[in-house]
């Protein structure tokens, strides 16, 4: 197996490690602060994925042994600190000591930061990020969103998906050179990174198109996030000279709140279709609600 293949394999196996520790942290905090909710709290189960990841990564030899040793030591300290908080809290039935909790939080945040830094290092080869925009690559989109669907089914954590496209693409291609068009795409990508929260994901799909995965958000929250992006574009005020017209650079979006069992490929197809066929103003946000396959077929054939 080539080094590039090993890097991609280790990157892919690192994603569930990050997710498992986030869920462990959530369960631990619930049990530390909400004793009165006995019977409703998540079980605190120590994640086993990190030890397996360390073992396999050592065998591959693609990460320095010194770094792996530091990560393993930090993980051990984090688990020990978490165990102590949990034992102390159960014994006295009060919230944990502030200093002890802060010590644990500091170790946890540093550990997770190290994992995400390592994730970025693996992705430098272009496995998971688009090198031009700095947004995530469509190569990892479906894997990422399937993970969010799994989280939704297990823990009820809602999220939204938005499909966006730069407005007036046909005119932009007519009046601007390739390098100028790329500049507009980069400007939108930079504003997306400014507008979304640190734990949201955004993907550049090519052809002036973007997908946003807005986590822990219902439809109203998702629309608010897209409104923030629209306002950032207004502040940027990039003007397009399209023949006799002068218009601001803008992007329109169609947003949906997935439910358990959704086919993400089909959902994105429908979002794109609704955005491209609706009678809408530029710089608009459409809310998508599922209709039956028969209704959609009738709608699509009626538009031909």
Image (cartoon, rainbow, N blue to C red):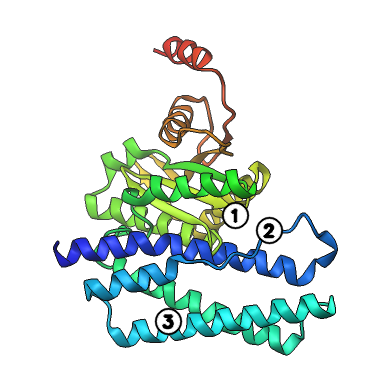
Q: Which mark is residue 42?
A: 2
Residue at (74, 72) in percent of width and height: 32
Residue at (44, 54) in percent of width and height: 202
Q: Secondary structure at mark 1?
A: helix
- Residue picked out by circle 3: 72
Is the residue marked by circle 2 packed among few (<14), some (14-19), or many (20+) residues within 10 Å? some
Coordinates of residue 189 in the picture (x, y in percent): 41, 57
Residue 248 in sight: no
Coordinates of residue 250 in the picture (x, y in percent): 47, 46
The correct choice, above or below, for 279 with respect to 119 in the image is above
Give the mark nearest the N terminus, 3 or 2.
2
- Residue picked out by circle 1: 228
Give the mark nearest the N terminus, 3 or 1.
3
Marks 3/1 in contact by CB < 8 Å: the verdict is no
Relative side of 206 to 143, left or right: left
Tell me the mark number nearer the camera, choosing from 3 and 1: 3
The correct choice, above or below, for 276 with respect to 143 in the image is above
- Tell me how far mark 3 sits from mark 2, CA to CA: 25 Å
- Tell me how far mark 2 sits from mark 1, CA to CA: 34 Å
- Quadrant (top left/top right/bottom left/bottom right) for the C terminus: top left
Coordinates of residue 73 in the picture (x, y in percent): 45, 86
């Amino acid at each position: 197996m080539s080094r590039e293949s090993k890097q991609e394999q280790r990157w892919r196996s690192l994603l569930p490690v990050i997710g498992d520790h986030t869920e462990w942290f959530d369960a631990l905090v619930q049990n530390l602060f909400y004793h009165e909710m006995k019977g409703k709290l998540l079980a605190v189960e120590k994640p086993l994925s990190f030890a397996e990841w360390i073992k396999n990564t050592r065998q591959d030899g693609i990460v320095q042994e010194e770094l792996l040793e530091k990560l393993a030591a930090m993980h051990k300290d984090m688990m020990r600190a978490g165990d102590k908080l949990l034992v102390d809290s159960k014994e006295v039935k009060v919230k944990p000591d502030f200093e002890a909790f802060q010590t644990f939080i500091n170790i946890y945040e540093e550990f997770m930061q190290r994992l995400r830094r390592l994730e970025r290092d693996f992705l430098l080869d272009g496995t998971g990020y688009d090198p031009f925009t700095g947004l995530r690559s469509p190569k990892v989109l479906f894997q990422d969103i399937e993970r969010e669907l799994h989280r939704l089914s297990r823990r009820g954590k809602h999220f939204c998906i938005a499909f966006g496209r730069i407005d007036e693409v046909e005119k932009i291609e007519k009046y601007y050179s390739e390098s100028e068009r790329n500049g507009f795409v980069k400007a939108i990508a930079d504003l997306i990174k400014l507008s979304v929260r640190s734990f949201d994901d955004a993907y550049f799909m090519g052809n002036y198109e973007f997908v946003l995965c807005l986590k822990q958000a219902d439809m109203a929250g998702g629309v608010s996030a897209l409104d923030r992006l629209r306002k950032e574009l207004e502040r940027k005020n990039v003007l397009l000279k399209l023949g006799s017209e002068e218009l601001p650079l803008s992007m329109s979006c169609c947003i949906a709140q997935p439910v358990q069992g959704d086919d993400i490929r089909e959902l994105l197809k429908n979002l794109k279709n609704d955005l491209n066929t609706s009678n809408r103003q530029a710089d608009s946000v459409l809310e998508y609600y599922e209709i039956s396959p028969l209704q959609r077929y009738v709608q699509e054939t009626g538009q031909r």
